[in-house]
Amino acid sequence: MAWTKEMPANPVVAVAGATGAVGREFLKVLHDLDFPASEVRALASARSAGTTVPFDGCGQVAAGELTVQEMTPQAFEGVDIALFSAGSDVSRAMREAVIAAGAVMIDNSSAFRMDADVPLVVPEVNPADVSWHNGVIANPNCSTIQMVVALKPLYELSRITRVVVSTYQAASGAGAPAMAELYDQTREYLNGTPDDELTVKAFQHRIAFNCIPHIDKFLDDASTKEEWKMVVETKKIMGDDNIQVAATCVRVPVLRCHGESINVEFEGEVTVDAARAALAAAPGITLMDDPANNVYPMPGLLAGTDGSYVGRLRKDPTVEHGLAFWNVADQIRKGAALNAVQIAQLLLP
């Protein structure tokens, strides 16, 4: 049975993991969208309790600093919406407490994404799926989100049968420590530090001036879990188990914004002009597609933006009905915090 509790017009919002990169971005997005909250609580681990995080205000909440509270089951009493980015283990541990408090958990981890009773939602693609939640709504993987936003208007032209995607994923996808490691390691490398003396903690290898074709753990079929996520999440979000997805996920030395090279195969003919018109009219999409004038999306120039950007749109001549394009989005914004707050907006009366 779907959730039946009524959401107030001015909900109390908890940000779980408020001191992390995505948690801080949650607070920025709540302000940027002027989410109509009556209260915003910043929650984190016991070691962060008592510290403060800046908040520019939203709804009925004035700008200032939020004092971080320890995330305990009791911390969710009176909360209506809980935005989670504290890792899968924490989400699992707090799920029952959040639901018991009458709150809806919007979870950014991978803990519940493929559970049959948990909607996996991208508001531009499958907003109606929030209607059958039972207290938990999952935020998809960052690389999946930006891709399906671009696939949705194309799917409406003709059913998509196959997607081949190679990702160029920023350090931000591995969190704030990974972004710091890219900075520090680049400095070390330019100062002449030998490879075997570089600080390597967040990644399997040096990320400075390098690309690492390894995100998350390897599975029995030699793919990675990140690649598996893109396969199964795309099917669930698009509502089509017959879409075939082949993914290769690569970490690159970029701070924010993932890039994706995407080839799409359709059941029927889709012209470049029709695809361009559909993408231009689609919510959440910004076309940057003027190669004659060197206009195309670039990760280094789109940090802090909200859209899923598409360029290099062209025919794929290797299949009967195919297109290819390049896609960029800010992993922390649309790939995480913005998508979650957009889901929260769908819950408002």
Image (tube, grey):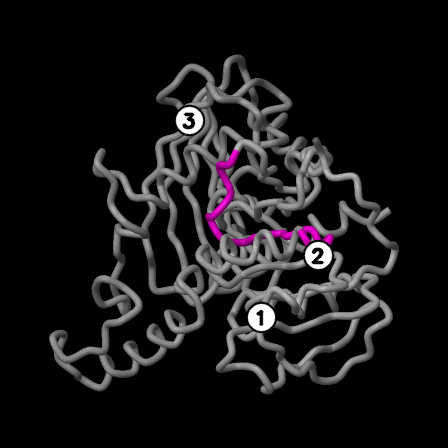
Q: Secondary structure at mark 2?
A: loop
Residue under numbered circle 2: 101
Residue at 64% from the left image edge and 56% from the top image edge: 98
Q: Marks 3 and 1, Cα distance to the nearest angstrom?
A: 50 Å
Residue at 69% from the left image edge and 81% from the top image edge: 66
Q: Tell which of 33 and 153 is nearer to you.
A: 33
Q: Tell which of 34 and 89 is nearer to you.
A: 89
- 185 over 75 or under it: above or below: below
**Disc 1 packing (10 Å; few <14; some 14–19; many ≥20):** many
Residue under numbered circle 1: 71
Number of numbered callouts drawn: 3
Asked whether residue 36 appears in the rendered view, the answer is: yes
Q: Tell which of 102 and 129 is nearer to you.
A: 102
Q: Amino acid at mark 2?
A: Ala
Given this view, does label 2 or label 3 mark the residue nearer the observer? 2
Residue 328 in the image, given as x and y percentages of width and height: 51, 51
Q: Quadrant of the N terminus?
A: top right
Residue under numbered circle 3: 316
Residue 59 in the image, given as x and y percentages of width and height: 84, 67
Asked whether residue 281 appears in the rendered view, the answer is: no
Residue 182 in the image, given as x and y percentages of width and height: 34, 73
Q: Secondary structure at mark 3?
A: loop
- Check contact, mark 1 vs mark 2: CB within 8 A: no
Residue 101 belongs to magenta span: yes
- 210 over 286 or under it: above or below: below
Given this view, does label 3 or label 1 mark the residue nearer the observer? 1
Mark 2 or 3 closer to N-term? 2
Q: Amino acid at mark 3?
A: Asp
Q: Is residue 260 left or right of residue 253?
A: right
Residue at 58% from the left image edge and 68% from the top image edge: 72
Q: Which residues are magenta?
A: 100-115
